[in-house]
Image (tube, rainbow, N blue to C red):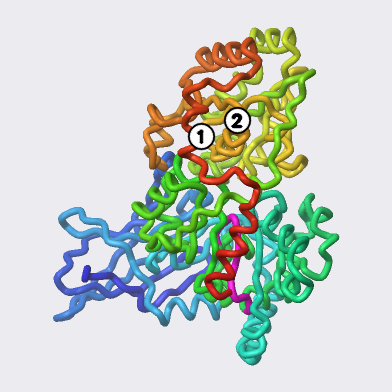
Amino acid sequence: MAEKIMVRKLKLRQKSFCLAVEAPGTMEICEAKLVYRNVICPAQYPLKLEVKCREEKKEFTVSADISAMELAPGDWDVYLYQKNGQQVPVILDAGTRLRLILGSYEIKTGAGFILFPMGSSDHMLTFRYRAESEYDSPAVAAKEFLAFAIWKALKPYWEKRRIWLVYEKYAREAQDNGFYFFQYCMEELPEKEKKRVFYIMDKKSVQWKKTEKYNKQIVSFMSFKHMLYLLAARVYVASDSRAHSFAWQPKPNLITRETSRKPILFLQHGVTAFKRVDKNFGQKGSTPMTHFAVTSKFEQDIVTKNFGYAQENVPILGFCRWDVLENRASETEKKILIMPTWRSWLEEQGNEVFVNSQYCKCYRSLLENKELENFLKKHKVKLVFHIHPKMREYLNAFQEKNERVELIPHGSRQLNELIMECSMLITDYSSVSWDVYYLGKPVIFYQFDYELYMKAHGSYIDMEKELFGDRCLTEKELAEKIKEYVRNDFAEKERYGAMRKERFAYTDKNNCRRTLDYLKSKGY
């Protein structure tokens, strides 16, 4: 077993932190650093290191003055370095992890931001820097403790309830696999069975009204009932990770400690192929799943080979949201949906960084392309641009007057409606491409930053050879492909249509039923 450096004490002051750590005597530690976890904007700061030698162990004091650092939002890891250059993470011991949950450990850095310690993968010490949230208050912490106490005291009662808890991204959405599975349960299950199926929803969401008709089966996000049901649930059924069931990026707390142990059927947000996520969702990843639903033998092979799950826990069920998909493309005015995925290196980086990024410049240039605008006007075709939810605050960066472009703020339209209404999709690496492909519509992949994307994320397939649509690296290539498809009335190319049978196991609109049957077969 690899030797580890363990945190024994952790103190936070107004603008600094101090750690007492312990390492095996064989390690020759010479420096310590705070390292930013961002592949595009790397940064690091040296930490003050003091050494106290003993026979079998070495004790260190690691300290930092935060006021002297220009921290960017995101995660900062603490590393110690041996003389041979080897980087060694610092691990939180059980006692320190418990103290972080029970205490209030944070540094207010000004401008509405906080820095707090937490355990990330394998209990590695990480400092998270983010904006303060309404859920950081003592009142919310008290509610968490009360919910935990009641759950513990009445645990046999909650086990008899056999609650299923369903949710989607940030518990603010009702348009993905989670919602369509929940809706199926509400419409098809007997009264007695549906009473144990609940859906988490934030009242602030623009999609709240869509769920109101289910009344008693809706759990209001961050309410006391929400916290209690998170603890009491027999299983989670979700299109995103456990992290999306609670306040985003919370400080260490009792609720998320317990939710990390709950069984979950991962319905997925998108087909696993274009982006390597086994470090997140793999059996040994930061947010492992219990059951991992997939759409085909092709996808099942990717998951079993790369994620470490047994085949029986990777059922081929199909996506619940595909049960309602149908082609509604207009014959009079064609729409090309542009839906790029997010870039991890741009998240929470601020408006200036985003506006000057290659990502923003490339899509803005496309939307402002006058030659393309005139061509689309002549053929009565509109571009519909939908920005990823993690980039929604940057939509104003694309606000240019162009009668052929419609900008869609995230959440203002149902995503599946946009997919059904479009004649073609332009994306980069987004899994929404599978939904469009499922309907037999053409897809163009605009991969102007392919090398950067592969460096940051990687892929399970060869995107230079295995995509089910044309691939473009420049705006000029893309514009020509758009014109080609417009002239051919958006007909899918034969070679891409021939790949469909391998990529989709089911097109029978029974994905929700298969999902329900699978959960029952596992005894939930």
Q: Earlier in the sequence, mark 2 or mark 1?
A: 2
What residue would you read off at disc 2? 440
The image position of residue 374, as x and y in percent, is 70, 8
The residue at the point 44 percent across, 47 percent down is 299
Residue closer to the observer: 240 or 144: 240
Tell me: residue 296, above or below residue 166.
above
- Left or right: where does residue 371 sit relative to residue 33? right
Magenta highlight range: 232-241
- Left or right: where does residue 472 sit relative to residue 340? left
- Three-letter residue code for mark 2: Gly
The image position of residue 24, as x and y in percent, is 20, 74
Residue 366 placement: quadrant: top right
What residue would you read off at disc 1? 500
Q: Which mark is residue 129?
A: none
Residue closer to the observer: 323 or 367: 323
Residue 324 in sight from this viewpoint: yes
- Three-letter residue code for mark 1: Arg
User: For the image shown, how many numbered marks are present on the structure?
Assistant: 2
Q: Disc 1 on helix, strand or loop?
A: helix
The residue at the point 76 percent across, 20 percent down is 331
Q: Examine the structure image and report whether residue 519 is included in the region drawn in magenta.
A: no
The image position of residue 335, as x and y in percent, is 71, 24
